[in-house]
Image (cartoon, rainbow, N blue to C red):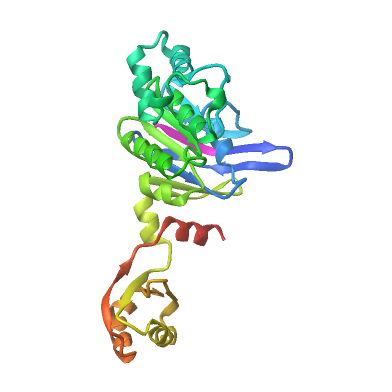
Amino acid sequence: MTVMTRGLRKQYGAHAALDGVDMEVTHGSVYGLVGPNGSGKTTLLSILAGLRRPTEGECSINVPRERVVLAPDTPQFEPWLTAREVVALAYSLVLGTPPPERVEQTLDEAGLTDALDRRVGGFSRGMLQRLGLAAALVADPELLLLDEPAAALDPMGRREVLDLIARERGSRTVVFSSHILSDVQEVCDTVGILRNGRLLYQGPLAQLLTGSAAPHYLVRLRDRPDQVAQVLRDVPWVRSVDISRGGAIRVAVSRLEDAECGLPAALARANARVVSFRPGEASLEEVFLEITT
Protein backbone atom coordinates (compact mmCIF):
# COMPACT_ATOMS: atom_id res chain seq x y z
CA MET A 1 0.00 0.00 0.00
CA THR A 2 1.58 3.31 -1.11
CA VAL A 3 -0.88 5.64 0.66
CA MET A 4 -3.02 5.00 3.73
CA THR A 5 -4.95 7.48 5.85
CA ARG A 6 -7.04 6.76 8.92
CA GLY A 7 -9.56 9.19 10.41
CA LEU A 8 -7.98 12.10 8.55
CA ARG A 9 -9.47 15.47 9.49
CA LYS A 10 -8.55 19.00 8.50
CA GLN A 11 -10.32 21.80 10.33
CA TYR A 12 -10.34 25.46 9.30
CA GLY A 13 -12.06 27.21 12.17
CA ALA A 14 -15.57 25.75 12.34
CA HIS A 15 -15.31 24.23 8.85
CA ALA A 16 -14.13 20.64 8.39
CA ALA A 17 -12.46 20.46 4.98
CA LEU A 18 -11.82 16.74 5.61
CA ASP A 19 -13.90 14.72 8.01
CA GLY A 20 -12.63 11.24 8.88
CA VAL A 21 -11.12 10.17 5.54
CA ASP A 22 -9.88 6.57 5.32
CA MET A 23 -8.01 6.34 2.02
CA GLU A 24 -6.03 3.44 0.55
CA VAL A 25 -3.97 3.65 -2.64
CA THR A 26 -2.22 0.49 -3.82
CA HIS A 27 1.22 0.54 -5.40
CA GLY A 28 1.24 1.17 -9.15
CA SER A 29 -2.43 2.12 -9.37
CA VAL A 30 -4.05 5.20 -10.93
CA TYR A 31 -6.46 6.55 -8.30
CA GLY A 32 -9.04 9.11 -9.39
CA LEU A 33 -10.32 11.50 -6.73
CA VAL A 34 -13.62 13.13 -7.73
CA GLY A 35 -16.07 15.38 -5.96
CA PRO A 36 -17.90 18.71 -6.20
CA ASN A 37 -16.05 22.00 -5.75
CA GLY A 38 -15.18 22.45 -2.10
CA SER A 39 -15.37 18.74 -1.32
CA GLY A 40 -11.77 18.61 0.01
CA LYS A 41 -9.83 17.20 -2.94
CA THR A 42 -7.07 19.83 -3.00
CA THR A 43 -6.76 19.77 0.80
CA LEU A 44 -6.33 15.99 0.76
CA LEU A 45 -3.66 16.13 -1.97
CA SER A 46 -1.82 18.86 -0.06
CA ILE A 47 -1.72 16.71 3.08
CA LEU A 48 -0.46 13.72 1.10
CA ALA A 49 2.28 15.94 -0.36
CA GLY A 50 3.30 17.15 3.12
CA LEU A 51 2.34 20.78 2.43
CA ARG A 52 -0.38 20.84 5.09
CA ARG A 53 -0.77 19.08 8.41
CA PRO A 54 -3.94 17.24 9.34
CA THR A 55 -5.86 18.37 12.42
CA GLU A 56 -6.45 14.75 13.42
CA GLY A 57 -5.79 11.27 12.10
CA GLU A 58 -2.94 9.40 10.50
CA CYS A 59 -1.34 9.68 7.06
CA SER A 60 1.14 7.02 5.96
CA ILE A 61 3.15 7.45 2.72
CA ASN A 62 5.26 4.36 2.05
CA VAL A 63 7.77 5.97 -0.29
CA PRO A 64 10.62 8.39 0.51
CA ARG A 65 9.38 11.96 0.79
CA GLU A 66 11.79 13.12 -1.91
CA ARG A 67 10.04 10.71 -4.30
CA VAL A 68 6.61 12.36 -3.78
CA VAL A 69 5.65 15.13 -6.21
CA LEU A 70 2.56 17.34 -6.39
CA ALA A 71 1.57 19.16 -9.59
CA PRO A 72 -0.91 21.94 -8.61
CA ASP A 73 -3.94 22.86 -10.68
CA THR A 74 -2.53 26.29 -11.58
CA PRO A 75 1.28 25.92 -11.79
CA GLN A 76 3.26 29.15 -11.84
CA PHE A 77 6.87 29.74 -12.86
CA GLU A 78 9.24 32.68 -13.14
CA PRO A 79 8.30 34.25 -16.48
CA TRP A 80 11.89 34.81 -17.68
CA LEU A 81 12.78 31.10 -17.48
CA THR A 82 12.49 28.87 -20.54
CA ALA A 83 10.61 25.56 -20.45
CA ARG A 84 13.95 23.74 -20.57
CA GLU A 85 15.24 25.72 -17.58
CA VAL A 86 12.06 25.13 -15.53
CA VAL A 87 12.25 21.36 -15.97
CA ALA A 88 16.03 21.26 -15.39
CA LEU A 89 15.57 23.26 -12.18
CA ALA A 90 12.88 20.83 -10.96
CA TYR A 91 15.26 17.92 -11.55
CA SER A 92 18.20 19.65 -9.83
CA LEU A 93 16.20 20.27 -6.65
CA VAL A 94 15.99 16.50 -6.16
CA LEU A 95 18.82 14.79 -8.04
CA GLY A 96 21.43 17.40 -8.95
CA THR A 97 22.53 18.33 -12.47
CA PRO A 98 20.08 16.82 -14.99
CA PRO A 99 21.12 14.98 -18.14
CA PRO A 100 20.00 17.19 -21.07
CA GLU A 101 18.35 14.25 -22.80
CA ARG A 102 16.17 13.58 -19.74
CA VAL A 103 14.87 17.14 -19.76
CA GLU A 104 14.11 17.06 -23.48
CA GLN A 105 12.45 13.64 -23.23
CA THR A 106 10.14 14.79 -20.44
CA LEU A 107 9.14 17.96 -22.29
CA ASP A 108 8.45 15.88 -25.37
CA GLU A 109 6.17 13.56 -23.37
CA ALA A 110 4.29 16.64 -22.17
CA GLY A 111 3.82 17.89 -25.73
CA LEU A 112 6.18 20.87 -25.40
CA THR A 113 8.96 19.94 -27.83
CA ASP A 114 8.32 23.05 -29.93
CA ALA A 115 8.55 25.30 -26.86
CA LEU A 116 11.79 24.03 -25.31
CA ASP A 117 13.54 27.38 -25.37
CA ARG A 118 10.58 29.74 -25.18
CA ARG A 119 10.19 31.88 -22.07
CA VAL A 120 7.22 30.68 -20.03
CA GLY A 121 5.89 34.20 -19.50
CA GLY A 122 4.27 33.87 -22.92
CA PHE A 123 2.74 30.43 -22.30
CA SER A 124 -1.00 29.86 -22.34
CA ARG A 125 -2.63 28.31 -19.26
CA GLY A 126 -2.81 24.98 -21.05
CA MET A 127 0.91 25.09 -21.83
CA LEU A 128 1.66 25.96 -18.21
CA GLN A 129 -0.43 22.97 -17.15
CA ARG A 130 1.66 20.66 -19.31
CA LEU A 131 4.88 22.31 -18.14
CA GLY A 132 3.84 21.66 -14.53
CA LEU A 133 3.31 18.02 -15.40
CA ALA A 134 6.76 17.83 -17.03
CA ALA A 135 8.38 19.42 -13.96
CA ALA A 136 6.64 16.84 -11.78
CA LEU A 137 7.72 13.86 -13.87
CA VAL A 138 11.32 14.74 -14.70
CA ALA A 139 12.82 13.39 -11.44
CA ASP A 140 10.95 10.06 -11.78
CA PRO A 141 8.76 10.21 -8.62
CA GLU A 142 7.30 7.08 -7.05
CA LEU A 143 4.09 8.88 -6.01
CA LEU A 144 2.66 11.45 -8.41
CA LEU A 145 -0.11 13.72 -7.10
CA LEU A 146 -1.98 15.66 -9.79
CA ASP A 147 -4.57 18.34 -9.04
CA GLU A 148 -6.88 18.79 -12.06
CA PRO A 149 -4.09 18.00 -14.58
CA ALA A 150 -6.26 18.41 -17.70
CA ALA A 151 -8.60 21.18 -16.58
CA ALA A 152 -7.25 23.93 -18.84
CA LEU A 153 -6.30 21.88 -21.88
CA ASP A 154 -7.86 21.75 -25.33
CA PRO A 155 -9.06 18.34 -26.58
CA MET A 156 -5.67 17.47 -28.11
CA GLY A 157 -3.83 18.49 -24.95
CA ARG A 158 -6.20 16.51 -22.77
CA ARG A 159 -5.66 13.46 -24.95
CA GLU A 160 -1.88 13.75 -24.57
CA VAL A 161 -2.09 14.16 -20.78
CA LEU A 162 -4.49 11.24 -20.34
CA ASP A 163 -2.29 9.01 -22.47
CA LEU A 164 0.71 10.04 -20.40
CA ILE A 165 -1.10 9.25 -17.13
CA ALA A 166 -2.29 5.89 -18.45
CA ARG A 167 1.29 4.95 -19.35
CA GLU A 168 2.38 5.51 -15.72
CA ARG A 169 0.22 2.64 -14.42
CA GLY A 170 2.43 -0.02 -12.87
CA SER A 171 5.62 2.04 -12.96
CA ARG A 172 4.56 4.62 -10.37
CA THR A 173 1.52 5.37 -8.21
CA VAL A 174 -0.71 8.21 -9.44
CA VAL A 175 -3.42 10.04 -7.52
CA PHE A 176 -5.22 12.72 -9.47
CA SER A 177 -8.27 14.84 -8.80
CA SER A 178 -10.60 15.90 -11.56
CA HIS A 179 -14.08 17.23 -12.17
CA ILE A 180 -13.97 15.78 -15.70
CA LEU A 181 -15.55 12.44 -14.90
CA SER A 182 -14.98 10.93 -18.34
CA ASP A 183 -11.23 11.43 -17.84
CA VAL A 184 -11.32 9.54 -14.55
CA GLN A 185 -13.39 6.76 -16.09
CA GLU A 186 -10.93 6.43 -18.97
CA VAL A 187 -7.61 6.14 -17.12
CA CYS A 188 -8.30 5.12 -13.50
CA ASP A 189 -8.52 1.65 -12.01
CA THR A 190 -9.60 2.94 -8.59
CA VAL A 191 -11.84 5.86 -7.66
CA GLY A 192 -12.64 7.79 -4.49
CA ILE A 193 -15.69 10.04 -4.28
CA LEU A 194 -15.46 12.97 -1.86
CA ARG A 195 -18.32 15.16 -0.70
CA ASN A 196 -18.23 17.68 2.16
CA GLY A 197 -14.92 16.26 3.33
CA ARG A 198 -16.20 12.67 3.55
CA LEU A 199 -15.11 9.76 1.37
CA LEU A 200 -18.47 8.38 0.22
CA TYR A 201 -17.03 5.61 -1.93
CA GLN A 202 -13.63 4.05 -2.51
CA GLY A 203 -12.88 1.02 -4.59
CA PRO A 204 -12.40 -0.44 -8.06
CA LEU A 205 -13.96 1.61 -10.83
CA ALA A 206 -15.49 -1.48 -12.46
CA GLN A 207 -17.23 -2.44 -9.21
CA LEU A 208 -18.64 1.07 -8.81
CA LEU A 209 -20.01 1.18 -12.35
CA THR A 210 -21.69 -2.22 -12.10
CA GLY A 211 -22.97 -1.96 -8.55
CA SER A 212 -24.32 1.54 -7.96
CA ALA A 213 -26.35 3.08 -10.75
CA ALA A 214 -29.70 1.78 -12.00
CA PRO A 215 -29.27 -0.98 -14.63
CA HIS A 216 -30.48 -0.11 -18.10
CA TYR A 217 -30.82 -1.39 -21.64
CA LEU A 218 -30.11 0.40 -24.92
CA VAL A 219 -32.69 -0.38 -27.62
CA ARG A 220 -32.32 0.63 -31.28
CA LEU A 221 -35.47 0.68 -33.36
CA ARG A 222 -36.23 0.91 -37.06
CA ASP A 223 -38.95 3.53 -36.46
CA ARG A 224 -41.60 4.94 -34.05
CA PRO A 225 -39.39 5.46 -30.97
CA ASP A 226 -41.93 7.84 -29.36
CA GLN A 227 -44.79 5.34 -29.49
CA VAL A 228 -42.63 2.46 -28.26
CA ALA A 229 -41.24 4.59 -25.43
CA GLN A 230 -44.76 5.40 -24.27
CA VAL A 231 -45.64 1.71 -24.04
CA LEU A 232 -42.46 0.95 -22.10
CA ARG A 233 -43.14 3.74 -19.58
CA ASP A 234 -46.28 1.89 -18.48
CA VAL A 235 -44.34 -1.28 -17.58
CA PRO A 236 -44.08 -1.61 -13.73
CA TRP A 237 -40.37 -2.50 -13.58
CA VAL A 238 -39.30 0.27 -15.98
CA ARG A 239 -37.92 3.25 -14.04
CA SER A 240 -37.45 5.68 -16.94
CA VAL A 241 -37.30 5.80 -20.73
CA ASP A 242 -35.23 8.37 -22.64
CA ILE A 243 -34.88 8.82 -26.39
CA SER A 244 -31.56 9.95 -27.87
CA ARG A 245 -31.21 12.22 -30.89
CA GLY A 246 -30.43 9.20 -33.03
CA GLY A 247 -33.67 7.48 -32.02
CA ALA A 248 -32.15 4.92 -29.65
CA ILE A 249 -34.07 4.29 -26.43
CA ARG A 250 -32.43 4.05 -23.00
CA VAL A 251 -34.60 1.96 -20.70
CA ALA A 252 -33.66 2.11 -16.99
CA VAL A 253 -35.08 -0.87 -15.07
CA SER A 254 -35.45 -1.91 -11.44
CA ARG A 255 -33.64 -5.22 -11.98
CA LEU A 256 -31.84 -6.71 -14.93
CA GLU A 257 -33.63 -10.00 -14.29
CA ASP A 258 -37.01 -8.33 -14.98
CA ALA A 259 -35.72 -6.82 -18.20
CA GLU A 260 -34.18 -10.07 -19.37
CA CYS A 261 -37.54 -11.82 -18.96
CA GLY A 262 -39.93 -9.05 -19.90
CA LEU A 263 -38.29 -6.57 -22.25
CA PRO A 264 -38.62 -8.67 -25.43
CA ALA A 265 -42.34 -9.23 -24.68
CA ALA A 266 -42.89 -5.53 -23.93
CA LEU A 267 -41.25 -4.57 -27.24
CA ALA A 268 -43.41 -7.12 -29.04
CA ARG A 269 -46.58 -5.66 -27.48
CA ALA A 270 -45.51 -2.25 -28.80
CA ASN A 271 -45.07 -3.74 -32.31
CA ALA A 272 -41.51 -2.43 -32.18
CA ARG A 273 -39.21 -3.09 -35.12
CA VAL A 274 -36.07 -3.87 -33.11
CA VAL A 275 -32.65 -3.45 -34.69
CA SER A 276 -30.75 -4.34 -31.51
CA PHE A 277 -30.86 -4.18 -27.75
CA ARG A 278 -28.16 -4.73 -25.14
CA PRO A 279 -27.42 -4.03 -21.49
CA GLY A 280 -25.93 -0.58 -21.01
CA GLU A 281 -22.97 0.33 -18.83
CA ALA A 282 -23.37 3.08 -16.27
CA SER A 283 -21.08 6.07 -16.73
CA LEU A 284 -19.09 7.51 -13.86
CA GLU A 285 -21.12 10.71 -14.17
CA GLU A 286 -24.38 8.83 -13.56
CA VAL A 287 -22.96 7.03 -10.55
CA PHE A 288 -21.38 10.23 -9.19
CA LEU A 289 -24.70 12.08 -9.33
CA GLU A 290 -26.51 9.14 -7.74
CA ILE A 291 -24.08 9.02 -4.82
CA THR A 292 -23.67 12.77 -4.22
CA THR A 293 -27.29 13.96 -4.59
* Residue at image point 39% right, 30% down: 110
Depicted 13 relative to depicted 209: above or below: above
Position of residue 115 relative to residue 12, above or below, is above
4 is within the stretch colored magenta: yes
Residue 273 visible in the displayed image? yes
Picture coordinates of residue 165, whole percent (x, y): 37, 36
Q: Is residue 229 left or right of residue 34?
A: left
Q: Quadrant of residue 215?
A: bottom left
Of the pair 129 and 24, the residue shown nearer to us: 129
| Above or below, 108 relative to 267 | above
In the current view of this chain or complex, which residue is farthest to the left? 275
Q: Is residue 275 left or right of residue 109?
A: left
Residue 136 x/y as whole percent: 45, 25
Looking at the image, is 93 positioned above or below residue 189? above
Out of 19 and 115, give the one closest to the viewer: 115
The tally of labels here is 0
User: Where is the N terminus found, in terms of image quarters?
Assistant: top left
Magenta stretch, main secondary structure, is strand
Residue 26 in sight in this render = no
Instruction: State the residue lying farthest toward the right.
Output: 13
Where is the C terminus found, in terms of image quarters?
bottom right
Q: What is the span of residues highlighted in magenta in the rendered image? A: 1-7
Based on the picture, tell me whether residue 60 belongs to the magenta stretch.
no
Horizontal and vertical percent position of residue 45: 53, 34
Locate residue 151, reporting x and y percent: 51, 42
Residue at image x 67%, y 37%? 11
**Quadrant position of residue 237:** bottom left
Q: Is 165 placed left or right of 75 in the picture?
A: left
